[in-house]
Image (spheres, rainbow, N blue to C red):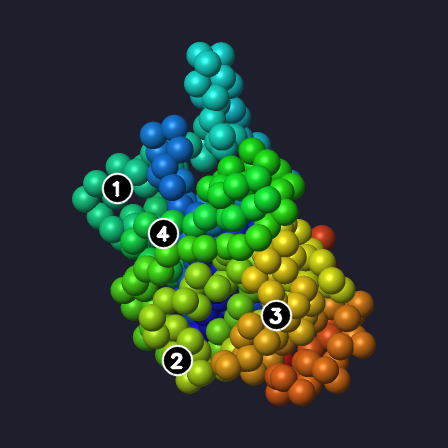
Amino acid sequence: MITVLSGGTGTPKLLQGIKEIVEPEDLTIIVNTLENDYFAGVYVSADIDTVLYTMADMINEETWYGVKNDTFITHERLEELSCPELLRIGDIDRATKIQKTLLMQNHSLQESVEIQSKHMGIASRIIPMSNENSEIKILTDIGELDFHDFLIKHQSQPEVLDVKFSKVRPAEGIIDTIRNSDAVILGPSNPITSILPILSLEGVRDALKETKVVAVSPIIGNDSVSGPAAKFMKAMDIEVSSVGVAKLYKDFLDVIVIDNLDKDLEDTLGEIINKVIITNTIMNSSDTKFSLAKKILDGI
């Protein structure tokens, strides 16, 4: 069994490659819930929904958020009614979020996601990292911001001074899932706000020490492939490089995958991690997603 730790952008691209190789029943995805919150009356679990849509072949690959070919009638009407939304939620996407909101009146988030997965015909397991709500604050040069305000309203522009988030309890079965995996893949999601929250769950780091762990670096050179990961790493005094990523995970990491452009880091990384795989990590086509996934799985 392969388990993947995922956020909502880089890792779903990798999942598209992995699911072409690994049997669906042998794949489990543990998903970040740090950014979950209510918007316009519905519960939004952005990373979970992105993984759901990815595994159901519905994802909007232009934004890596929402459903492809969605419409925005409700969103536009809310603006006309002087009730604008911070998030641009499509109509089909909103239906998923409404269903989840209703399900959570009688079910945990984990149970709700399992129900939605079955409705979407997904055979792989998708597990939220926690059933508890988290709180994240981005401390910036213009003050303390909620995550989505920083990301969307301010377009990730403010200087980041610190990132703070609350610790929550792991969802049921996460520790056993990691321990019983043949390998765990840490996808190329934001190390600070996507992967670190999962690693911060009680028992996760210890469980990872008991299995084979591969991490794909989301950093090339001294910048993130996408999103504000570099800003967050810098604010937390973590070197913005694949070396910084390796040091963040070094207590349990067996293999790190880096881009060809970072091949000069091989010797330095070799002093931290047992094995370094150098390949193309830019996933801009079906072929590159498949090739990266195969390279990772072959290296396990």
Name the mark nearer the viewer: 2 or 1.
2
CB contact under 8 Å: marks 3 and 4: no
Amino acid at pointer 1? Leu
Mark 3: secondary structure: helix
Q: Name the residue under label 2.
A: 206
Is tag 1's residue or tag 3's residue first in the polypeptide sequence?
Answer: 1
CB contact under 8 Å: marks 1 and 4: no
Is tag 3's residue or tag 4's residue first in the polypeptide sequence?
Answer: 4
Is tag 2's residue or tag 3's residue first in the polypeptide sequence?
Answer: 2
Mark 4 → mark 2, Cα distance in angstroms: 22 Å
Q: How crowded is mark 2: few (under 14 residues within 10 Å), some or many (20 or more)?
A: some
Judge left or right: residue 36 versus residue 67.
left
Residue 280 screen position, x and y as percent: 74, 66
- Screen quadrant of the N terminus: bottom left
Residue 289 screen position, x and y as percent: 66, 60
Q: Mark 3 points at which residue?
A: 245
Mark 2: secondary structure: helix
Residue 75 screen position, x and y as percent: 48, 23
Q: Foreground residue, 80 or 277?
A: 80
Residue 143 screen position, x and y as percent: 52, 41
- Residue at x 72% of width, y 82% of height: 268
Mark 2 → mark 1, Cα distance in angstroms: 33 Å
Q: Mark 1 points at which residue?
A: 103
Is tag 1's residue or tag 4's residue first in the polypeptide sequence?
Answer: 1
Mark 1 → mark 4, Cα distance in angstroms: 19 Å
**Residue 183 visible:** yes
Q: Mark 4 points at which residue?
A: 134
- Residue at x 34% of width, y 74% of height: 203
Residue furthest out toward the top = 81
Task: Write down the quadrant of residue 65 in the picture.
Answer: top right
Q: Look at the picture and state if 95 lies above or below 50.
A: above
